[in-house]
Amino acid sequence: MKILKKWYLFLMALCMAGVAASAHASSMEAPDALVKRISKEVMDAAKANKEIKQGNQKQIYALVENTIFPHVNFQRMTSLAAGRYWRQATPEQKEQLTREFRDLLVYTYANAVSKIDNQRLEFKPLRMSPNATDVVVYSRIIQPRGGEPIELSYRMEKTDNGWKIYDVNVLGAWLIETYKGTFASEISRSGIDGLINALAQKNKQLASAKPAAAKK
């Protein structure tokens, strides 16, 4: 799926440190510093842990859960992807849909993290007002051996618990908008429960697939 490929690039980008990251700051560290920091933490862990490079799903999932996902607002991400249908969903359906969407990213990430090679991530200077609560962090993946750079943008919001990622733009396309069409099509065919079931089935397929080990 093209959507999963774009999420692959996004999640891979979060693994790669293109510049030196700042030291741990308060919960309100700048949004670009946050992305740089978690990128470095994941990259360092992947390099130090041979089992992660070999595709050990359990350890990759733990790395994702502990390092990246605390900084992603999955509920907002899911609500934006569901669009007007989010208001029609029951609290239980909202919880299930958010969980399945979140799991989809976990399983997709498991395949991405073990394939990191020599790419690096560069960030553009962040310009934001002191009172900004919603910003876009611009970056790009620099490919080894002169490959074409991949443009990436992260849409982030300021919350009481720090800045959170809630959307990403890969190669000019915001993924929330892409998922919105897919979600709407599935809901129109089989309702919100049908979308939840479709995501659950996809997650089962991804969970049963073993990530390929990184090249030596």
Image (cartoon, rainbow, N blue to C red):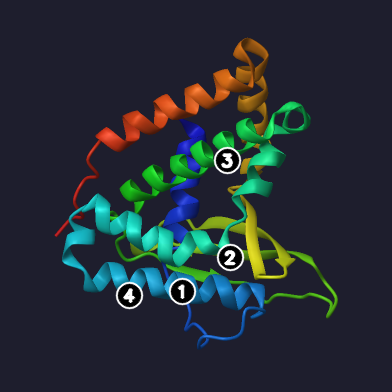
Judge whether 208 appears above or below 59 on screen: above
Residue pictured at 32% horizontal, 66% vertical? 118
Instruction: Classify residue 203 as left or right of residue 98.
Output: left
> Secondary structure under badge 1?
loop
Q: Is residue 102 left or right of residue 58?
A: right
Circle 3 sits on which residue? Answer: 98
Residue that numbered label 2 is attached to? 139
Q: Where the N terminus falls, by quadrant?
A: top left
Query: In the rendered image, which residue does mark 1 sit on?
Result: 18
Against 182, is 72 above or below?
Answer: below
Q: Which residue is mark 4?
A: 44
The picture places residue 167, in percent across and down from the top left corner, at: 64, 51
N-term-proximal mark, 3 vs 1: 1
Image point (66%, 69%), residue name? 163
Q: Earlier in the sequence, mark 2 or mark 3?
A: 3
Q: Amino acid at mark 3?
A: Thr
- Residue furthest to the top: 189
